[in-house]
Each structure stands twice: as structure tokens, then as C-alpha cells.
Image: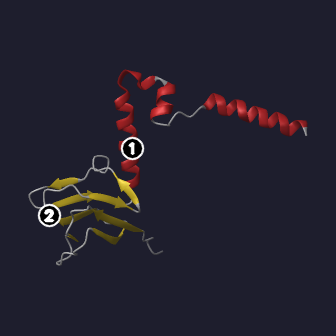
Amino acid sequence: MAELSYRMKIEIFHPELTGARLSTESKMTSASHVEWQLNDNTPSVTIFFQPAHMMPKLRWNNFLINDWLAEIDFDWEQGCLTLNTGQDFASRYKSRDIDGRISSLGANSTNDFLLDRSVGIVKHTDLVNKLNKIIDEKRTAN
């Protein structure tokens, strides 16, 4: 059986960006917005950009990504960044986002109301059970 091949789109942009290239390319693309289509099993992507010493923005599959959550390594002297991609990129990004939100709550991280408002991961088991009971009662009444 053939292995499934996924595609991902990586975009780099900034008003001051004059060019960018992947580490696998020899020629710099001159533009303030550059995008590439890559295989999803690519373990990491290194992008060189000009001018150096700037903080370009990145999109992954049309989603603006946070450089801290995506664990992007910047090399300001070389004018490059490395993004660890691959099929688990989205799950790693989401886990880091949730962990960061929970840790920002500090001592309140056990408060279900604050977890739900700040993170949105409370399961609301009691509410779901009550709603299921009402639905079941209405079904049996008909």
C-alpha cells in the first residue's frame, strides 16, 4: 500500500521583506510575501530571509502561527528561521498553546470556570448528562 502524502503550505511575509528562500533552494525569491508547498513529512524547514534582523510572520496552511507556540528558532545574524514541521506539528502546537494557557492561570488552574473561560478544555460532564437525560425522556414520551 502506498504511503499517504500530505501537503502543507508555508508562507513568510513582512512589509520590509525583500526576499526569501528555502534552504534547499539556491535563488532568493524577491517579494514581501513568499509561499511554498511542501510534503507534510518534512521534519523541518529552514527559511532564509532578507533583510536580516527582522521578525517576519509565518502562516502554516493559511493559519498565522505564533513563533513561541511553533517553537521557531531564529538566527538573526544569518537572517534565517527553522520551523520543526511534520505530521505532528498541529498537535504539538495545540498542546503547547493549552499548556501555556493553563500555566498562566497559576494557582487557579484547578478552577473549572477559569479553565473553561481561558482554555476551553472542561468537559462539562454533568451538563452533558443532564441534557442527555432530558433528550432521552422526550424520546420515550413520544
Kindly state the secondary structure of the residue where label 2 is placed.
loop
Specify whether 111 is left or right of 97. right
State the image coordinates of residue 77 (x, y, percent, origin top left). 8, 57
Task: Tell me which residue sits at (78%, 33%) in the image.
Answer: 134
Task: Please tell me whether mark 1 or mark 2 is closer to you in this view.
Answer: 2
Q: CA distance from mark 1 to mark 2?
A: 32 Å
Question: Going by the picture, which residue comes out furthest to the top?
Answer: 107
* Residue 102 point in image, percent of width and height: 39, 32
Decide if residue 76 is on the left or right side of residue 62. Answer: left
Whether the residues at callouts 1 and 2 have beta carbons within 8 Å, the answer is no
Q: Farthest residue toward the front? A: 15
Q: Is residue 85 left or right of residue 76?
A: right
Name the amino acid, label 1.
Ser
Q: Furthest residue to the right?
A: 142
Q: Can residue 41 be seen by looking at this rendering?
A: no
The residue lying toward the viewer, choosing from 60 and 56, is: 56
Disc 1: which residue: 95
Residue labelled with disc 2: 51
Examine the rendered structure and indicate whether residue 65 appears above or below residue 119: below
Q: Who's the residue at 35% across and 43% down the image?
A: 96
**Residue 97 location, x and y as percent?**
37, 42
Mark 2 crowd level (few <14, some 14–19, many ≥20, 10 Å Cα): some
Q: Residue 132's quadrant in the figure?
A: top right
- Looking at numbered disc 2 in the image, what kind of residue is underneath it? Pro
Q: Nearer the viewer, residue 20 or 89?
A: 20
In terms of sequence position, does the residue under pointer 1 or pointer 2 come before the other?
2
Q: Position of residue 1 (x, y in %)?
A: 48, 74
Residue found 28% across the figure and 64% down from its top: 12
One can see residue 27 in this view: yes
Q: Looking at the rendering, in which quadrant would you find the C terminus?
A: top right
